[in-house]
Image (cartoon, rainbow, N blue to C red):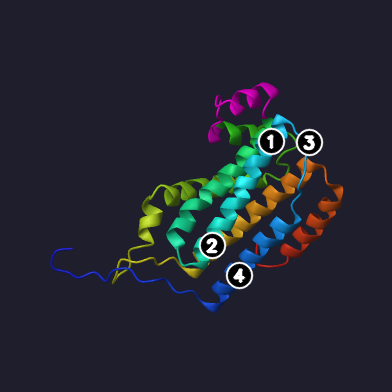
Amino acid sequence: MIGQTAVMPQRQEYSKVLTERILNAQRLSSWLLENQPQETKATNRNRISGAFFNIALDHHVAVVFLMANYMVSPAFALARSIWEAYLRGLWAKELATDSDLGKFIVGQGDPKMVSIIKAIKSHPDLDLENTIAKLHDEAWEPLNSYGHGGSLQVQRWITGESVEAAHTDDEVADLLRFINHVAFRACVALVELAEADHLAEVFLRKGNELATTDWF
């Protein structure tokens, strides 16, 4: 700015509480990796949906890694990819026809998010408590802003005295809760694909445990 001096970026520091939240997210990533099923039936539906759910889990690991290394802005930018991979996995698992999947696997018929969400909302059993639709309606616009370098991303780099990452602890904690929740859902979907009843019990207990913490 002409006639003024702006302090340039320095590394954003975390509070002890936020540092512990990031460690918890790392622990969750490790737990999901250790407990996810290793085999499933070799069908197009399982291959495609399983790929999407695993991509969501990989993105979760990446976002947590970025957070742990103080790369907050790219972590926020990548969060959309976790959500989108999870929803596309649901599309392949529950909504797509065999014809849809056949076209998709050869590079045709890529589903749009608008149509996926519309189908999820109209599905009688997929979103009984309207949780997925509510999460999408609340998160999609902010996720796009962060992912595409929109105003929400830039606003967190402009303070009264400097240009540097200035995401609040609450904002980072909210993002961690969101990605943890989605990653857990993605792994549960993998358990369902594998028809792994023994793991279903393990994940039910873990979900009940996590519901009593601030991980979600």
Q: Residue furthest left?
A: 3
Callout 2 secondary element: helix
Q: CA distance from mark 3 to mark 4?
A: 34 Å
Q: Which quarter of the image is occupied by the C terminus?
A: bottom right
* Tag shown at residue 41: 3
Residue marked by disc 1:
47
Q: Residues within 10 Å of mark 2 (few under 14, many from 20)?
A: some
In this orientation, which residue lies closer to the viewer: 25 or 107?
107
Residue 27 in the image, given as x and y percentages of width and height = 66, 66
Q: Amino acid at mark 3?
A: Lys
In this orientation, which residue lies closer to the viewer: 56 or 6?
56
Residue marked by disc 2:
65
Sequence-first disc among 3 and 4: 4
Sequence-first disc among 1 and 2: 1
Dividing the picture into quadrants, the one containing residue 91 is top right
Image vertical order of residue 161 relative to residue 33, above or below: below
Residue 178 in the image, given as x and y percentages of width and height = 59, 56
Q: Residue 138 in magenta?
A: no
